[in-house]
Image (cartoon, coloured by chain):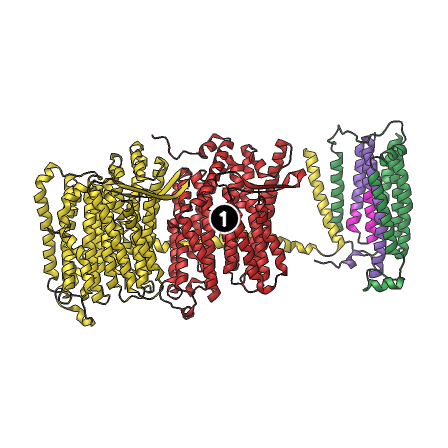
Amino acid sequence: MYEQIAFYLFSALTVGLFMVTVLSKNILYSMTSLAAGMVLISGFFFLLGADFLGVVQLIVYVGAVMALYAFAMMFFDATRDIKEKNTSSALVFLLGGMAALLLVVVFAAPIMGENIQASYPVIEGVGNAESVGMVLFTKYLVPFEVAAVMLLVAMIAGIILAGKKMDHSLTTVDDPINVQEETK
Amino acid sequence: MIGLSHYLIISGILFAIGLVGVLRRKNLLMLFFATEIMLNAANVAFAAVSNYYHDLTGQMFAFFIIAVAASEVAVGLGLLIVLYKKFGTLDLDDLASMKG
Amino acid sequence: MEKYVYIALFAPLVSSIFAALFGMSSKKNFVGVIASLLLATSFMASATLASYIAEGGAAIHVTMMEWIGAGDLMIPFGFMVDHVSVTMMVVVTLVSTVVHIYSIGYMDHDKSFNRFFSYLSAFVFSMLVLVMSDNFAGLFIGWEGVGVCSWLLIGFWYHKEDVSPEVNPSISPSWAANEAFIVNRIADLAMLVGIFVLYWNTGSLQYDVVFAELPHLDTAILTTAAIALFIGAMGKSAQFPLHTWLTDAMEGPTPVSALIHAATMVTAGVFLVIRANPLYSMDAVSDVSYFIAALGTFVAFFAASMALVNRDLKRIIAYSTLSQLGYMFAAAGLGAYWIALFHLAAHAFFKALLFLGAGNVMHAMHDELDIFKMGGLKQSMRATYYYMGIASIALAGIPPFAGFFSKDAIIETAFNEGTLILWIMLVVTAGMTAFYSFRQVFLTFNGDHRYKEFGIHPHEMYKFVLVAMSPLALLAMIAGFFQGSFQEFITKLLPNYEMSHHTHELVYYLGGLVLVVAVSGIALAWKKYGNGLKRDEKCENSFIYQLLKNQYYIPHFYAEFISRPYALVSEMMWRNVDMKIVDATVDAIAHILYFSGDKTRKMQTGNLSHYLNWMGVGFVLLLIVAAITTVIG
Amino acid sequence: MDNILSVLVFFPAIAGLLGFVVDKGSARVYGISVATVELLLALWLWMSFDTANAGMQYVELIPLVPDFGINYYVGVDGISLFIVVMTALMTLLGMIGMSIEKEIKNMIISLLFLEMTMIGVFVALDAIVFYLFWELSLVPMLYIIGAWGGPLRIYASVKFFLYTFTGSLIMLVGMLFMAYLYNSVSGVWSFSLTDWYALVLPENYQIWLFLAFFAGFAIKVPMFPFHTWLPYAHGQAPTIGSVILAAVLLKMGTYGFVRFSLPLFPDASVMMIWPISVLAIIMVIYTAMVAYAQEDIKQVIAYSSVSHMGIIILGTFAMNAEGISGSIFLMLSHGIVSGALFMLVGVIYDRRHTKLMSEFGGLAAVMPKYAVIFGFMLMASVGLPLTIGFVGEFLVLLGFYEISPIGAILGGTTIIIGAIYMLTVYKRTFFGPVTNEKNKTLPDLNGKELTALVPLVAIVIWLGVYPKPVLGPIDTSVKALISFMHEKARSDIAKDTITLSKSVKEAK
């Protein structure tokens, strides 16, 4: 009963908030509703017993990613309304609607593999964070490390692209060597 | 009783919302937002499947998706800043330079 | 004895290669002399072999080496000298020796003198391979070889231009050469089929093996083989409907006409039927044999009729050759193989003589061939006149010359077999033969000197040429007396053919009848042409005359209904089918790809949003597929 | 010299690489010397070849991708030996007779690479290696046509490349499926032909695989109606390109039929006899007629090539030793004769820069040596006995007669219509008066051209009179092939059609 109420509440709210994100003309509204939606998504995760994932969602998405967006927005003129030529919105909504409908059809259809064997079954009596940790640091160790490297790379890339010589755009300079010399 | 299908359907609807955003918006930042929505929709589906099949693989996937999303935002936003500095806009209609 | 076989066979080849070495240099008399000497050597060797065989020697088989060996097929270069082939060898080498010597004189002024001897000797070699081979494949080598030499020699004066058929029915030497080659090829295909049939049913192509197997074969197979081989023979021997090339082949130098298109090559068909007599004398193929006889008779009559009105000296002789070949086929078809062979030999002598005589006339008349423009040549060309007279008497079948014995035997055979229609036609043809032979002789040598208005001063041929012709003249006169001994000689190999008792009683009446017909033909010719040319407009404009003059419109028919449509269809195949259908289809596929790329290029607007829209479309399409499969599955 | 085959394959390529450092002026001499050495090696291979042995000889096997059973696996038998020798010979003679001055060095290098790929195709016993060489052969030819060709060269070379490439991709799919089938039966991966031979497939698989291979081979041959790339390629290619294309590249298709289609899919081959022979007969007659309608001498010879390839196909599908031996011999003879004919056309093209028959006439008087050699090749082309052309044609028609008398007769019309178009060309070019002023002073063959052509004339006569040294080894291998196919065939009708030795039928 609890679960049902929570599910429908979260569903209604996320759908609503994300609609606002997608349709709003103001970036600030969009971002705020997106952040709110993310929080509610973590609610789904808690409902689904993926506690660790929910926490990660909150920390990474709502915390880090949204903060990053917020900072980035400061470079742009965020308070102004965005002027866009939203042509052929009929097509867009047709495609979106069809996609939703079809996804519903596909997902509503009985899942074929009723006898799917769980390759990393949830261990009874062990907490979610523990079991995630066990799988992550055994079976998924290599991907985990790769992901870590990827994050590092992304961080450096972000710094290089946005930081340092903020008054020189690396893509517009004709002679990168001179820029390097200047930076020295 | 809330079943797997419920979660999958809500995930589908969320994905479709993200898709509408991707298709409709011209502002690159908005496209990023829409992409995040789609990624989150996928995460919900993964978590749901993981839960209903008692298999942690789904959560692992969702976990990595979050990692990828974080990196994407970091790099993507950096690029957006460069782009904005160069062209002074983030509107795709103004950025079309690769006409075939 | 084997060495004589090799000498007889390879002396002409050596001669050919020797002459070919000088093929591109200017005229060298010694080339002709050496070629003639080598040919004479070959004749000597052949004669030696003939006497050896005549004295009762066993047939000689030599196998030089393996030629083609694949699967179960084994074809050697094998040669066989037996009664039939030795007869042919003697005839071929004799006539060709004479023709070689004759050519030294005749080709005197031709700048391609050496080349001519090379071709001529190559022809003799091919012909010898043809007659001496001990298997069908070897026969086919010679068969095609003589075809090529014939092509080379008909087209010897290749530099002449094509003219319209009204001016010269042969159009040009090169045209005539191609016609001869292609028509012969049609028959050769049938011959190949005959060879295939025999191979797949007897497992060999050796004569002895094949003939030994024949009695075990189906009637259908035998009939197929007999028909196919005979069609092959029809091409080489220019039987209707493949006859048109022979008269056109007269474009070649006259010695060539004498050797190839009278004495030797065209008789190859007859030789084939004689060689394959075990096949053709079988009861199972009696219908085919009868057809051969009937066709031969028809051709004899048909060709003679065209000779009646022709004005071209060489073409008249060519028609008479055709007609005589018909006689030979009639005899062979009726089972009288030895008589056919006898007529073949006798005909070779007097017909070669006739052609060589015609060559002298041509030489004298500066290549003018229209007998209406000649006349009264006997004063200036007495020897030639006698030679042609002898040959014509022999051809007309007046005793005691050779033609009487051989031709009369054929006519008797037709009577003996009870094929009355054939007999009547052959008798009538004998009369026509006499008429046209003497029409030609009288128009050429007797009467007024019509050539004078064209400013021609005829002169006799060189002495040595005339001497060289004498053996042929002698044989044309006396060959008939050897009929009995020849029969005795040849029937050791060939089935004997004896007249029935009834025919034997009537033989004098029959011979007398033929003789009367022939003499009346000559008399008619004398009456009409003996004292010069009197043209009869009414007769010349009559339908029959025009029909005969235009060769029954057969060349015209072939040109209109075979050559032209072939060219048109070929052109259409290329321009319409190949270019517009086959190739266009390929190009159309390429164009579809190209245009679809060209059209879809507009999708590349450079606007990311548009790309994303297209991506959305693709995503939805994929979803549709997924949905359909989940719902259905 | 156990690895003579590798030497044969890679020597020209390595020499070609070294050719980049050779001085431009001596590039031609360099190319000719390399090709001569290659020919000598090929002749050495022939001399030391064990003619009594029907199997593969000089086999080399080096694993390349062991997990998928891909090996560098080469060997020769009687079927491929002579094609290899002919390839070396034609490359050499083509180079000697070549008149190209422009970018001679690049041409020589292209030719040497082409030689590697061609020899590679004929000695490869591994499907992947075969495919590799097969496709690589397109590249140098693309350059040769595209860089040295006539005005339409780009169109012609692209058409040649894409058309044949499409076919071979389908063949590749067939090869992969074949390997998959082999894997599913035996559990290991293998692309080795000798392994594949052992695999007996159900008939429905055979048909599909046969068709996949057919697509590759038929376009290469080229069979009607896939032939239209050929006249363009020949029409635009420089002389040397046409020579190699006609002499060797086309043979890859027919060789493929003998090496792959027949032994791998005996039942399917027997089932496909009818459709294929109908195509082949159409090809023989139709292209011969088209050849007759041409105005360009080179196009006549190009179409005549197609027509003769039809005869080769007929022989291949005769399913008896006579027919298949004949078709392989005909491959050689067609290679020699059509190569020579293209060289001959190149001779007058060099002098007059036109190939239209209407521009010529009476050349026999002006260029007698040329006319004689052309005449020899013409006679070989129309299949005159005692020339090389007859032996193969005779055997093929003889062999096919057993399958179908009507088919053999229809195919046999080639001796008539072949004579028609060839004699017409000869008459229009060489006979008649010399009408065109420009032709009156044409020089006859020079030493270079004679050096290239006279050996071909000698071969034409030698192998016409005494084909045994070549036909013998071919026949030995073909007999082994036939008995292998007979053993392997599943259906009775196929067993019955593939005959071991039944030339003498039961006397009825």
Find the magenta span and give its range: B19-40
Q: Which chain is red?
A: D
Q: Is D6 situated left or right of A107 in this image?
A: left
Chain appearing in purple on the rendered image: B
Q: Give C41 or D426, whichever is nearer the viewer.
A: C41
Q: Residue B61, relative to residue C313: is it above or below? A: above
Tag 1, which chain?
Answer: D
Rendered image quadrant of residue D439: bottom left
Q: Quadrant of residue C177?
A: bottom left
D104 lies left or right of B69: left
Task: Give residue D392's position: percent from left, percent from top.
Answer: 42, 46
**Colour yellow maps to chain:** C
Indicate the secondary structure of the residue bearing disc 1: loop
The colour applied to the residues of chain A in this rendering is green
- Give the prevailing secondary structure in the magenta stretch: helix
Q: Amino acid at mark 1?
A: Pro
